[in-house]
Amino acid sequence: MSSLSVFLSILATLSIGAMSPGPSFVLVSRIAVSRSRVDGLAAAVGMGLGGVLFSILALAGLTALLSQFGWLYLALKVAGGLYLAYIAYKIWRGASEPLEIGETTAANRAVGRSFMTAFLTQVSNPKTIVVYASIFAALLPKTIPLELLVAIPLGVFAVEAGWYTIVALAFSARHPRRIYLAAKKWIDRAAGAVMAGLGLQLVVSGLSGR
């Protein structure tokens, strides 16, 4: 199989995973609808760079270290779950607070915060690196050509950031924002509950050694 065929196969597999519902989708869609389109796009970039970090670590063989020291992997899962629970708490706590939606001045946009929250959410689940490593192990040749080592992280960024850019653009449109404003309290509480559930799942799987 040529390097191009391998590369396209990896991207196709990663695309399916990126589009699966999870904490990243919940977070980016909420940022886009509750803050601004620019914040949503910043969150998409954060997701993309988080994916790049995990892809580089998977290619570098960090998964072998996590396999050798199982306690480290489980500790990372618990830490990641607690971070998601913290984000859920912040969303739930702010559900009743009034919010002004609109394309405001740049000073009113916490773009850096949106980026960092998305990045940390992306890297909060160490299971992602295991998924990446499994895909790479299944599709990459034993000797990886240099062009693939360079292209794969770039491709991961394109997949992750590209998908969440679509999410950000969709949820920052006028109609989704009107719906959000009309039912902010319940939408935020639902988003917080989903995020808390995902975080709890990570914590429980980490503590139980699964």
Image (cartoon, rainbow, N blue to C red):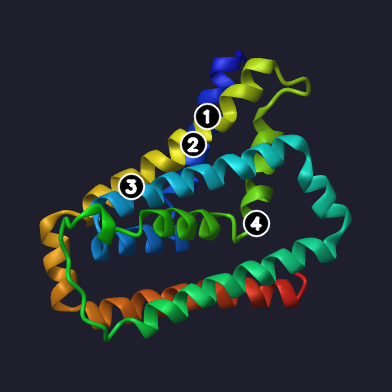
Q: Nearer the viewer, mark 4 or mark 3?
A: 3
Question: Considering only vertical position in the picture, is 152 above or below 5?
Answer: below
Q: Nearer the viewer, mark 1 or mark 4?
A: 1
Type of amino acid at the residue the image marks with label 3 = Leu
- Please report the residue visible at 33 percent of the width from the left and 44 percent of the height from the top: 165
Q: Are marks 2 and 1 in contact (CB under 8 Å)?
A: yes
Label 2 vs label 4: CA separation?
18 Å
Mark number displayed over residue 154: 1
Mark 3, other Cα within 10 Å: few <14 / some 14–19 / many ≥20: many
Residue pointed to by mark 3: 41
Mark 2, other Cα within 10 Å: few <14 / some 14–19 / many ≥20: many
- Please report the residue visible at 25 percent of the width from the left and 66 percent of the height from the top: 34
Q: Nearer the viewer, mark 2 or mark 4?
A: 2
Could you tell me residue 23's position as x and y percent?
A: 46, 63
Mark 4, other Cα within 10 Å: few <14 / some 14–19 / many ≥20: some
- Please report the residue visible at 54 percent of the width from the left and 16 percent of the height from the top: 4
Compared across the picture, whether 31 is left or right of 136 comes to left
Q: Are marks 4 and 3 in contact (CB under 8 Å)?
A: no
- Which residue occupies the foreground of this view, 9 or 167? 167
